[in-house]
Image: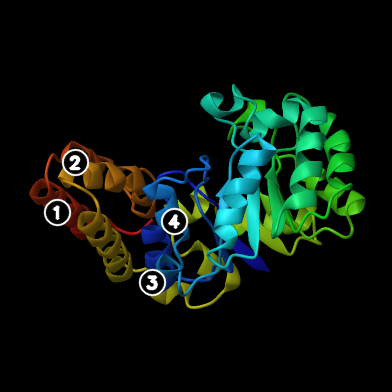
């Protein structure tokens, strides 16, 4: 089973990815948070610099609905030695979909078809796609599959929900089975609510042929999940000591690179939204972390949580 780490905007940065690979591992491929500008700002450039991704396999993700913009970004990414980019057709955020980008692009399939024709015709490197199965109805999936069938998709990562479902409701695993039947020559990867060994087993029961899974929130909540699913040293990794070292490396990375304490604390508090679920009865301590206004308060609050809370 291949395991991928999903791109989570603002969280799975190169600082997080490198710390994760160091302390937990088990991920076969990492995807960057999306790049949305052909000018590629400093934050976006930092995500793809080879020196920031030396020991891990990384695929840059692009979010746009303009072929010329996609190709300009791809050309620049290729200059850094990348062989594959990923097209984001999965983001369900209202601010993204309102502009017919991300999952919103699925609502105009004819425009999407023209876009795909141009980028696959002119891209200097391979293109994989991360997609939802439609916007409002699962009946849209059949048409989308026929569309993807027309192009040399390097890999199709399927978040088995509709745009309107956001991250709610049970994923439509049957849609993944339909893709396997319709696209025998395209490598497929399943995405959606793999958060534990139990949900992993349920997926394999429903779709036994699955050989690649992308996980996002499940790993943010339990960094040892990849090791647990691959049954490799999970017990040694899921310890207070390892979690603390992982946290401290991320914190030090942001503190060294960001201007001022406030931006670093925002980053760390976003991470704790998920990481706190690795601990039992952490709510009271999490509130202290969220209220911390400087590094000194933050360090005390974090130490108190690690000392007082059992692992979940």
| Other residues around mark 1 within 10 Å, as few (<14) / some (14–19) / many (≥20) | some
Q: Which mark is residue 23?
A: 3
- Disc 2 from disc 4: Cα separation: 21 Å
Position of 18 compared to 197: left or right? left
| Other residues around mark 2 within 10 Å, as few (<14) / some (14–19) / many (≥20) | some
Pick the front one: 32 or 28? 32
- Disc 3 from disc 2: Cα separation: 26 Å
Q: Position of residue 94 (x, y in %)?
A: 55, 24
Which residue in the structure is indicated by mark 2? 262
Q: Secondary structure at mark 2?
A: helix
Q: Secondary structure at mark 1?
A: helix
Q: Residue at horizontal 59%, vertical 40%?
A: 63
Q: Nearer the viewer, mark 1 or mark 4?
A: 4
Which residue in the structure is indicated by mark 1? 299
Q: Quadrant of residue 47?
A: bottom left
- Disc 1 from disc 2: Cα separation: 14 Å
């Amino acid at each position: 089973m291949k395991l991928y780490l999903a791109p989570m905007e603002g969280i799975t940065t190169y600082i997080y990815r490198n710390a994760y690979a160091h302390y937990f591992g088990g991920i076969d491929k990492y995807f960057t948070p999306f790049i949305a500008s052909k000018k590629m700002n400093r934050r976006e450039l930092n995500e793809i610099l080879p020196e920031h991704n030396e020991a891990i396999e990384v695929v840059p993700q692009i979010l746009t609905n303009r072929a010329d913009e996609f190709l300009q970004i791809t050309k620049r990414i290729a200059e850094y030695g990348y062989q594959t980019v990923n097209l984001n057709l999965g983001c369900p955020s209202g601010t993204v979909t309102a502009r017919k980008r991300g999952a919103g692009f699925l609502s105009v399939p004819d425009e999407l078809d023209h876009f795909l024709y141009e980028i696959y015709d002119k891209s200097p490197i391979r293109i994989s796609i991360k997609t939802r199965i439609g916007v409002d109805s699962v009946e849209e999936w059949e048409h989308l599959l026929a569309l993807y069938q027309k192009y040399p998709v390097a890999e199709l990562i399927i978040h088995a929900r509709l745009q309107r479902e956001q991250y709610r409701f049970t994923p439509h695993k049957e849609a993944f089975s339909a893709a396997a039947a319709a696209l025998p020559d395209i490598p497929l990867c399943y995405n959606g609510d793999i958060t534990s060994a139990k949900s992993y087993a349920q997926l394999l029961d429903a779709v036994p042929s699955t050989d690649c899974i992308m996980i996002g929130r499940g790993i943010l909540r339990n960094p040892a999940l990849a090791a647990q699913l691959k049954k490799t040293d999970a017990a040694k990794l899921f310890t207070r000591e390892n979690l603390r070292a992982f946290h401290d490396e991320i914190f030090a990375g942001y503190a060294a690179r960001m201007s001022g304490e406030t931006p670093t604390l925002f980053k760390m508090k976003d991470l704790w939204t998920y990481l706190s679920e690795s601990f039992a009865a952490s709510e009271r301590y999490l509130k202290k972390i969220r209220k911390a206004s400087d590094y000194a308060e933050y360090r005390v609050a974090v130490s108190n949580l690690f000392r007082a809370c059992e692992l979940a």
